[in-house]
Amino acid sequence: DYYKFLRIQDAFKSLHIHVNLIGVIVDLGFFTGSDYSCTLKIVDPWHSGPGLPVKFIARNVQALPRVKSIGDIISLSRVKIVLVNRKVTALCNETSSFALFNGKNDEDFVPYQWSPKFQMKEQDKNFLSNLRECFTSLKDIKEGECANLSCLIAHISKDDKTRWHIFVWDGTEMPPCNIFVKSERLPLCIEPEMLPTHVLRKFPTFGSVLGIIVDKVSEKHATHCLQPGDHVKLLNLFFQVNCGLWSAVFTPSTKMQYTMNREMQEFTPQRFTICREKFSSRWNHSTRCITPSHSGGVAHEDAPFVTLMDILTNHKVTAKFRCVVRFIQVSPKNIRKFRDFNGKFKVVAILEDATARIRASLYADEGDMFFGCDSSDEEALVKKLNRLLGG
């Protein structure tokens, strides 16, 4: 009874060998009636690329797998790794066996379809549990890599005939990025223009919202059918960073699966609410820094701690808050130009936290209060700017 599952990345190196595999189904091919065959692709936590093709050959159509949904799990025993049209493929025939399981998060370990030779092992339950959690949180994404997400659709928009922006959230915070781009002014968002306030007010105000760029919309993605509040699983998203902003793009192997709301609730924080009220006013996406630089505390200690998304969606034109933020840029870059032609302090900073990126102004006496030194003292200003910007 001894056996083990081979990782999919190792299966690509195991030509002409019989192996056991278990993975998440990310693609379904067409059924061929002439020879009773079909093909699908699978991935596992160690391989999230295009996937390993699995070809099934049977004596009749009833013996072929009938997959209910992308994202389901398949267990394969004694499949042979071969080349089919010069592609490494796992071949499942009469000497092999398979079983199909629901991919959703539950404790059901009973397959909904299995071949006669399939035998369930106790160890299979651990593999099934791990694969059902084969999704990355936004807090764990890595630049230049593909991963799977289970998330909520916060908003979807279209900026031209072919490009869509999908905004998703899972309640976690994306990691901060190093910024190496030398730009006169860093962008505030990945989309061409900041979303209007009445849209942002429908966003959660904690946790990061990831923007997904879809350049070439395929009918199989059914992007036009997505609605805010939908819960989906996205397979094989590619994550990238531009000007310190996270985004993701669809790849040719990206798949999408709708999930039930109760699945998402397992990791939805209890304090998550989305305000669906509509307001006509627009915020100009800027704020003022009014915090002194001394280490003994901050001004306005009676003001509430909020996120930058709270500020962007605040209903009051004038209000005071406290935030934990990162300074990522200050303009002008030349400290000798920190005062305008009237001799007043005038600086614009770009701040960010896990929820948003905004511009903040330091003007006149507020600038002197914030830095706590005379703007003519260049050495002191440079030292404080370096501390603010992480230098």
Image (spheres, grey):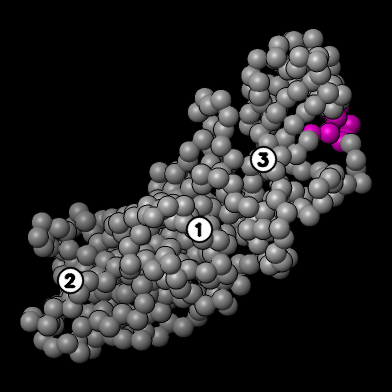
**Which mark is in front, 1 or 2?**
1
Q: Quadrant of residue 293?
A: top right
Q: Which mark is residue 358?
A: 3
Mark toward the start of the polypeptide (3 vs 2): 2
Q: Residue furthest front?
A: 280
Q: Say whether marks 1 and 2 touch (CB < 8 Å).
A: no
Question: Is the residue marked by circle 2 packed among few (<14), some (14-19), or many (20+) residues within 10 Å?
Answer: many
On the question of residue 337 being in view, the answer is yes
Pair 3/1: label in front: 1
Tell me the crowding category of disc 1: few under 14, some 14 to 19, or many 20 or more residues within 10 angstroms, Cα based. Answer: few
| Screen quadrant of the C terminus | top right
Asked whether disc 3 touches disc 2, contact meaning CB atoms under 8 Å apart, the reply is no
Q: Which residue is mark 1?
A: 157
Magenta span includes 296: yes
Q: Which residues make up the magenta segment? A: 289-298
Q: Nearer the viewer, residue 236 or 43?
A: 236
Left/right of residue 20 with respect to residue 171 in the rendered view:
left
- At 10% from the left and 56% from the top, the residue drawn is 86
- The Cα atoms of the two marked residues, 3 and 2, are separated by 51 Å
Mark 2: which secondary structure? strand
Name the dominant secondary structure of the magenta segment: loop
Amino acid type at circle 1 is Ser
Amino acid under label 3? Ile
**Is 194 drawn above or below residue 206 in the view shown?**
above
Location of the N terminus (image quadrant): bottom left
Q: Is residue 361 placed above or below 258 in the rendered structure?
A: above
* Spatial separation of the CA atoms under disc 1 and disc 2: 38 Å
Mark 2, residue position: 55
Quarter of the image for residue 201 reads bottom right
